[in-house]
Amino acid sequence: MTTVREALDTLDYVAAPESDAEARAWIAAEGPDFDHWIDGDWRAPRAEERFAVYNPADGVQIASAAQGDAADIAAAVAAAGAALPAWRALSGGDRARHLYALARHVQKQHRLLATLETLDNGKPIRESRDLDIPLAARHFYHHAGWAQLAETELAGLEGVGVCAQIIPWNFPLLMLAWKVAPALAMGNTVVLKPAEHTPLTALRFARLAAEAGLPPGVLNIVTGDGRTGALLVEHPGVDKVAFTGSTDVGRILRQATAGTGKALTLELGGKSPFVVFADADLDSAIEGVVDAIWFNQGQVCCAGSRLLVQENIAEALYDRLRARMESLRVGSPFDKTVDIGAIIAPVQLERIRALCAAGEAEGARCWQPTWAVPQEGWFFPPTLFTDVAPASTIAREEIFGPVLVAMTFRTPDEAVALANDTRYGLAASVWSQDLDTALDVARRIRAGTVWVNCTNQFDAASGFGGYQESGFGREGGREGLWAYLQPRIPWVDVDGATEEVVEPIHAGLPRSVASTNASVSPDPVSPDPASPDPASPIPATSAAGTIPPRIDRTAKMYIGGRQVRPDGGYSSPVVGAGGVVIGHVGLGNRKDVRNAVEAARGAASWGLRSGHSRAQVLYFLGENLDARRTELEARIAASCGCSAVAAIAELDAALDACFTWAAWADKWDGAVHDTPLRGFVAAIHEPLDIVGVVAPDTSPLSALLGLAGPLLATGNRVVLVPSQTNPLVATDLYQVLETSDLPAGVLNLITGARADLAPVLADHDEVDALWFAADSVGDGALAAECERRSAGNLKQTWVLGPGRDWHARDAAFERDRLRHATQVKNIWLPHGV
Amino acid sequence: MIPHPVSEEGEDGMREPSGFSATTAVTSDRNTAAAAAMRSDGAAAPAEANRAAQRAVATDRDVARNPGQPLNLDWALDVRVNRSAVERRAATLATRRAVKREAQAAWLLHAVRLLDLTTLAGDDTAGRVRRLCGKARQPVRPEILEALGVGDLALRVGAVCVYHNQVATAVAALAGSGIPVCAVSTGFPAGQIPFALRRDQVRASVEAGAAEIDIVIHRPHVLTGRWNQLYDEVAAFKEASGPAAMKTILATGELATLSQVGQASRVCLQAGSDFIKTSTGKEKVNATLPVGLVMVRTMRSYAERSGHSCGFKPAGGIGSAKDAIAWLRLVREELGTEALAPGRLRLGASSVLADIERQLEHHVTGRYSAFRRHPLA
C-alpha cells in the first residue's frame, strides 16, 4: 500500500481499480455455466457441451458458455421465426417503445455492463465505461427513433425476417447494439451469436431485454464457436446474415450464403491509413495515433495501423511518438490509470508476436518502450515499426494488436496512392490544417469512413462500413437501415427456385435459354408467337423486283470506346422471330472481359466528373437513340418477334431510361448526419467504380439502359453482358454510344453466353460489384455461382429477380438501383477556431 | 517512511524571501536533464534511476530561468492547432489518469506547494494581505498533515501574489518564511497604459522586494500581428525585472484563436519569459485546459529548440481541488513529472486552498468536511 508520503515523493499515479465485484456476482448468480438464451429464457445446450470463458487480464477462467449445435440453432431460429409475425405486425411506435426501453436499461445497468465487458474482454474500464456502453445505448435510442418513423419515412418497406447476426470479440456489447438495434427497429427478429471469447455481455443483455419487456423469441442468443456460426448461417429459416469479423470468415459466409437468397452484410477487416501531412497539428496528430492504434489494444477493425507521414517531418514525428509511447500505461484493465489493457487470448497474442517477428525478419525497425508489460495475463506493449516498405508483410496484413507500422510519402498524390494500396477500405484518418489538402485527400481515399483531424469517432447517426474487401453494407444512420429492410411486396425471387433448379443454364446461344423463360410475368417485348410476323430488318425480295442485298454488318464487342472483334474469333448466329437467322454476334470470352475491365479501369475520370457533366452525356445518348429509333424498333421487333407497337414501347422505355438516369445524375445527394461532433459528418455517395452487369434477355434495350443508366449516372464504369437472346439490339447501340460523347471505357458491352461471361466477371478482382438480372428461375444456379465466386474480392452482388417491369417508372426500384450503384463514405470534419 | 530527499526546511533556511540565488548554469543543466528525462516517464516499471531523479526535481523551488532568444518569427508563427483535437485530449486526460486515494492526497499537498496565493482586489488592505500571508505560512492545519503522515513537511505555498502597493506589506509579513512575493505589474490587468509606465512599474515592484513579477502583454499587439513590438516590450520587462523571475500573462481569453495563443507563447518565450501564464483572472474566460494544453506544448517545443524548460502558471477559475489536480495531470502528462516542481509550475488562485483543505481532511477522516473548519485565507 502506497503511503501519502511515498506518493508525494514520486508524484506517480497510484492504481485506481474499479471494482469487478458486481460483474462477478452476476456471473455467480446466473452462471457460471451459462446456457443459451432462446425464446425468452435460458435453454441448456442439447449436447451439454460447454467452453471456458477467461479473464484476459489474468488468464483465469471466469465462466463457461454453451457450445451451440444444430438442435440449439434450430430451436433459436424457430423461436425467432415464431416471434416474427407479431413483432413485425407491431406499429413502428410500439417497437420504438421497446427500443427505448432497451436504451434505458442499458443506461441503468451501465456500470455492470462496463465492468462485465472489461472482465470478459480485457479492455480498459475507461473504454468500456466511456465508449462501448454509452455508444451501445445511443444506438438503441437512435433506432428507437427510426422505429417511430418507420411508417412515414420508410413507407412501403418492411423487415427482412429472421436475422442471423455474428459478432466479434473486440466490442462485444457495442457490436451487439449495432446489429440488434436496427434489426429490431425495422421489424426483424434475431438470433445472435457472440464471439466465443466474449459471450458474457450478450447473455447479460438477453436478461436485460427480458427485464425491459422485449417479447420472447424476438432476440435469441446462441453461444458457440465458428461451428455454431456456420450452422446458424446455413439454417434455411434465416432470411438475413449480418457478420462483423475477419475478412477470411466473411469470404466463407459469402460462399455459404451464395444462391440462398439470404441478404448479406459484412463488416470485415482493415489496414487503415493514418495520414499526417507536414502542416498538421503534430501534437494532436500524436494523440490521434494513440487513439487510432492503442485504443482497445489495437484490436479494432478500423484501427489506424498504417502511419503515413510526410517525409520531411517523419523523423521528428517518430521521435515525439516514441516519447509519447514511453508515457503510455499498460496494465490491469480495471485500473483507471491505464491506457492499454490485455489482449483477448493467447492465440491472438501469438499472432501479434508472429507478425512482429515477420516484420523484423523483413528488415523493419521495431521499437517498444523501455518499460515492461505485466507478466501475468495476456499483454503486449505498444509497438512502432519504422523502415517499413509497402511490400512488407506487416504493411499489408491486419495485425489486430497494438502495433503501428510507419511509412513516408512525398506528395499528396503519393499519400493517396499509399493509403489506397490495400485490399481493404474500412477507414482512414487524415491530418492537415490545410482545408484543401485534408478534403481533397479525404475524397480520394477509398474507405467507408474518413476522419479528418480525428480518428475512431463513431455515432449511431452515421453509417459505418467498408469498401472493397472490408465488406459491404453500413451500420448506423439511414444508410444502415437498408440492411434490414425489403420492399413490402417482394419481387419474384430467385432463391425459392434454386432448390429445384440444379443444372446450370446451358452454355451457348441463344434461343434454348428463352424456352426456360416460363414463370416470367408478361413482358411487352417478350416473344409473342401470336402476333403477326414483324418486318424483317433484311428486306426480302419485293414485288417490284430485285434490290441489291444490304451490306453485311459485323457485330463486334464494344470495348474501350471501340468496336473490337471477339478475342476468340467465334461468332454465333442470332435467331430472330420465326426461327430466321437475323445476324451473327461475337462470342465473348474471358479475355474480352479482361480487356473490357482494363478499359474500364482506364476510364476512372468518369467518376470525377460532375453529375451535370454525366447527365449531359446521358441526355445526348437519349437524343441519338431517338434519332435512330426507326432502325432500332425494327431490330427489336425482328429479334424479339414482337409487334411494332411493342417495339415502339421498348424504345420509348429505353429513351425514358436515358432521361431518367440523366435526371438522377446530379440529384443522388448525400447527407450531413446529425452526430454529437462539432462539425460535419458528410455522407457522400461514391461510385463502386467498376461494375459488371448481366442484363436479362427480355426488354433487351430498356433493361440494358435501365441497368447501365443508374451505374453511369452515379459515376461507375460498366462492363455489361447484354441480352443473349437479342444481342443485336445491343450491338446496334454501339454507333449511338460512339456519337454520344461517352468516354472510352465507361460502358463496355460483351456479347456472348452469360454462363461463360458472368463467372469471369464474378471472379475478376478489379470488378467491384456484379449485378445479375435473372430472366427466369433457371438463372438461379448461375446467380448462385456468381455469388460464390464473388467471395474472391468480396465484391458486392445484386441478383435482380425475374419479372421486373423495365417500362414502368417505379420510385422504389429507382432508389434501389441508386443505392446499389453507390456506397456511402462518411467524412468526419470537426471544426473549431 | 521514506525520508524526504530534499529537505524543505533546509532549502528554506538557505533562502531569503526574495531569494533566487541559484545560478543560471545550475538551473539550465537541470533543465536539460529534465528535458531528457521527460521522455522516460515509464508507467509499468520506470527505471529506479529515473524515479530518483524525479524526486529530486519535483520539489525543486528554484524558479526556471529563461535567458530568451533572438526573435525568430518564422518559427514563432509556424503554429498549427486543431481545436477539436486539443479539446478531445483535454477532455480525456482525466478519464485516462484517475488520481485517487493516497495519490489524490499527495497531489493535493503538492498543489499547495504550487499555489500562488492571490489577492488582487480594489479593497485589499494591509490587514487583508497580512491575513493571506499567515495562511501562506501555514496553508493546511498541522493536525491534518500529521494524520496524513507528513507532519514534518513544513508545507507552504509557492508565492503570495499581490498588487504593487501591497508588496512591502507582504514582504514584511513573509519575512523568514522563504515564501516569495509576487507582484502583478505592467498595468495589470489590461495593460492599457503607456509603455514607460508599465516598465517602470516592474522596476518599482522589484525594488519594493517582489521576487516574482507577473506582467501582462499588450493584447492589441497580438490581435493586430505586431509581433516585433510584443517581443521588444516583453524583453524590456524582462530586463526591468532584473533578478526577479518574470511570468508573462497572455490573457488568453482575449486572444482570437488557439493558434494565436501558441504564437504569442512562442514570442514571449523567445523574449525571455521565465513562466508563461494563462490569465489575469479578470478576463471573461480564464484558464481552460485546452488553452493550457497549447501553452505547455509550446513550452515543450521551445525547450527542444532552446534547451530551456520554462515554467507554466494557469490562473483564474481554478476553484476546486479537482481543478488543481486537472492542471497537475495535464502538466505531468505533457511535460513529465519534473515539470511539476514549484520552480516550474504555479497555480494562480485565491479560493482553491479552502477546497483542498476540505478534501485533505476528508481523506483523513472519511467524512465530508466543512469550510468553516479551515482557517480563512
Image: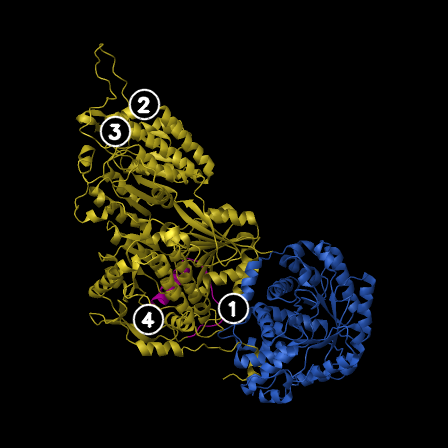
Numbered label attached to residue A585: 3
Magenta-tinted stretch: A346-374
A258 left or right of A815 in image: left
Query: Mark 2 and mark 3: span between their CA atoms?
Result: 21 Å
Q: Which of marks 2 and 3 is nearer the N terminus?
A: 3
Chain of the residue that carries numbered disc 2 in the rendered image? A
Callout 4: SS? helix
Tell me the yellow chain: A
The quarter holding residue B61 reads bottom right
B128 left or right of A800 in image: right
Q: Which of marks 2 and 1 is nearer the N terminus?
A: 1
- What is the residue that sits farthest to the top in this orientation? A544
Q: Which of marks 4 and 3 is in front?
A: 4
Circle 1: is it few (<14), some (14-19), or many (20+) Cα within 10 Å? Answer: many
Query: Mark 2 and mark 1: span between their CA atoms?
Result: 77 Å
Callout 2: SS? helix
Q: Name the residue under label 4.
A: A207
Callout 3: SS? strand
Numbered label attached to residue A326: 1
Residue type at the position of mark 1: Glu
Chain of the residue that carries numbered disc 4 in the rendered image? A
Numbered label attached to residue B271: none
Circle 3: is it few (<14), some (14-19), or many (20+) Cα within 10 Å? Answer: many
Residue type at the position of mark 4: Arg
Circle 2: is it few (<14), some (14-19), or many (20+) Cα within 10 Å? Answer: some
Task: State if disc 3 and disc 2 touch (CB < 8 Å).
Answer: no
